């Protein structure tokens, strides 16, 4: 699989403080890669470096094999970027906000209506950006990011502060981009989002990678308990040690018709993060 | 580059029509000139008195405050960052804004000139003097906008600067000491040119002051531009 993002031993210092320490990441084309970490972990700094907005202090950072320090117009055509601050023109309506970016690329406006429909903003196309709700502004910023049909989409906290319905809608849009073959690089401090969307997760804490892998891999790696939890028809929960005897007991429960569901007891990403750093993802 | 500047001009026109703060800067002095020139006639009032007075205030105020506000707002709202990621170079962005401000202010100047009774060759001279002033003020305003982190800090910088360049020429009409001090600023030299517009003469002093002012302002602008646009990219 060709690499969309290659980061090796990346370091970045700001005001004498090291904000990224020897970061190494690889993201294959068509993958969704998530940077999971609390506020101040260095997620936005990493996106800023990968999108050429910030010069790193040292290390390798490449997007489609091109050094992020020297990105040009052609390279930017492959990228869709949605940062934590929306950067919308408040006194312009949704359509004009997108039209402006199409004009910058020397393109016509034919693509705007389908993209607005895709993000559910067709009815609000003439609404000024300043009159949009937070969720709608988020959708508009997302629409702007996908307007170029990017090969690589950078999303910085795309659902931060949104209600569950809008969050779900944004998730669907991200997965739709993946289906179209785009690589998605997203930052989040929401473990459910990371678990649901990402093929590969990097846990970042104070500028350092503390763990990485697929969500399932990471959770399995820290499954120290090795237990199976059974939920019985009676409402009772039974925990079994993960060994040969467990099979017999489960078979017995099944035969008696008292077993309702079987669950694993592996930790979730937040628990893993807490085990590794001693703090939660919301800190 | 052509697409970028065209798009920025389009965006500014769309945006300014709904931005009352900026819009008022462009139309306030032309409207005041029309009203005053038609409504007030004082004994021994020099020809084109109100037009000349408001023209220089327009030069010192409109381009400076409007471009500073536009750039500072783009920085505050992070739209400038998005533009940079859309491969718009700092130079293209500023050029687009400078062209826009220059064109709008030139139209405003035309209204002031016509309201003041200028016509033919004198009107062209008036427009040329105003154009020089708009250009210098716009570059100074752009420098302030680039330096400022947000609209609030831009306002706190533009107000004193604007007071100096727009009010000193007016106050110099009433006080000789102020007139002597004001000679070193470009707006006062332009004011003197306007006062003698029938026989305009670019004296050595006038040329020197205009050139030095323009060079100093350009240097401030380049310093600010490099500091803000060059570091991040």
Image: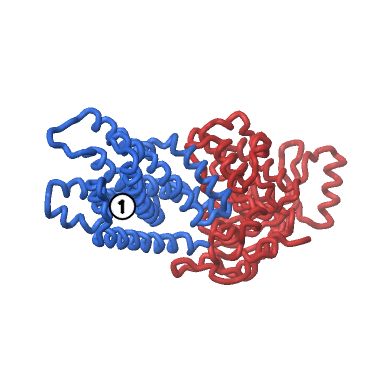
Residues B207 and A244: in front is B207
Please indicate, yes or no, whether residue B168 appears anywhere in the rendered image: yes
Residue B211, image x, y percentages: 32, 61
Residue B152 lies, in percent from the top left, at: 35, 47
| Above or below, B111 relative to A75 | above
Name the quadrant containing residue A143.
top right
User: Dividing the picture into quarters, in which one does residue B216 lie?
Assistant: bottom left
| Residue A84 on image: x %, y % | 54, 49
Decide: is A105 above or below A109. Answer: below
Image spot of residue A273 (x, y percent): 60, 58
Which chain is blue in the picture? B
Query: Residue visible at 26% across and 54% down?
Result: B201
Q: Secondary structure at mark 1?
A: helix
Of A5 and B207, the residue lying toward us: B207
Residue at coordinates 53% horizontally, 56% vertically from top-left? B89
In this rendering, position of residue A155 left or right of residue B202 = right
Which hue belongs to chain A?
A: red
Residue at 37% x, 52% y: name it.
Answer: B135
Reading the image, the residue beneath label 1 is B157
């Amino acid at each position: 699989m060709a690499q969309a993002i290659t980061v090796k031993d990346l370091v970045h210092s700001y005001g004498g403080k090291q904000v990224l320490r020897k970061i190494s990441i690889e993201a294959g084309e068509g993958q969704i890669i998530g940077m999971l970490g609390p506020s101040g972990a260095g997620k936005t700094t990493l996106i800023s470096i990968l999108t050429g907005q910030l010069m790193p202090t040292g290390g390798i950072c490449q997007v489609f094999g091109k050094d992020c320090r020297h990105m040009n117009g052609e390279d930017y055509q492959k990228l869709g970027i949605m940062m934590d601050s929306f950067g919308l023109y408040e006194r312009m309506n949704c359509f004009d906000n997108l039209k402006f970016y199409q004009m910058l690329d020397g393109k016509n406006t034919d693509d705007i209506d389908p993209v607005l429909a895709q993000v559910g903003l067709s009815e609000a196309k003439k609404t000024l950006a300043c009159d949009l709700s937070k969720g709608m502004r988020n959708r508009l910023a997302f629409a702007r990011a996908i307007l170029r049909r990017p090969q690589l989409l950078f999303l910085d906290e795309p659902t931060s502060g949104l209600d569950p319905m809008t969050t779900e809608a944004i998730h669907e849009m991200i997965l739709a981009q993946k289906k179209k073959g785009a690589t998605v690089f997203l930052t989040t401090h929401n473990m459910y989002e990371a678990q649901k969307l990402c093929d590969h997760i990097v846990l970042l804490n104070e500028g350092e990678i503390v763990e990485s892998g697929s969500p399932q891999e990471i959770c399995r790696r820290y499954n120290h308990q090795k237990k199976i939890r059974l939920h019985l028809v009676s409402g009772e929960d039974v925990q079994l040690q993960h060994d040969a005897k467990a099979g017999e007991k489960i078979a017995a429960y099944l035969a008696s018709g008292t077993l309702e569901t079987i669950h694993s007891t592996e930790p979730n990403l937040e628990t893993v993060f807490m085990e590794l750093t001693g703090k939660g993802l919301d800190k | 580059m052509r697409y970028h500047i065209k798009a920025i001009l389009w965006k500014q026109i769309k945006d300014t029509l709904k931005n009352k703060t900026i819009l008022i800067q462009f139309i306030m002095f032309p409207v005041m000139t029309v009203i005053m020139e038609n409504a007030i006639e004082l004994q021994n009032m020099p020809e084109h008195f109100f037009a000349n007075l408001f023209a220089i205030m327009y030069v010192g105020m409109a381009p400076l405050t409007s471009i500073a506000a536009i750039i500072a707002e783009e920085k505050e709202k992070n739209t400038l960052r998005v533009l940079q990621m859309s491969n718009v170079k700092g130079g293209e962005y500023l050029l687009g804004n400078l062209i826009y401000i220059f064109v709008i202010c030139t139209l405003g100047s035309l209204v002031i000139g016509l309201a003041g009774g200028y016509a033919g060759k004198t009107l062209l001279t008036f427009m040329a003097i105003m154009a020089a002033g708009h250009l210098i003020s716009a570059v100074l305003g752009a420098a302030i906008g680039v330096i400022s982190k947000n609209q609030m800090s831009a306002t706190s910088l533009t107000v004193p600067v604007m007071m100096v360049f727009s009010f000193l020429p007016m106050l110099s009409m009433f006080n000789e000491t102020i007139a002597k001090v004001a000679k070193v600023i470009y707006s006062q030299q332009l004011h003197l040119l306007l006062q003698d517009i029938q026989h305009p003469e670019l004296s050595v002093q006038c040329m020197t002051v205009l050139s030095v002012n323009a060079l100093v302002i350009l240097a401030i602008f380049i310093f600010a531009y490099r500091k803000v646009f060059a570091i991040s990219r």
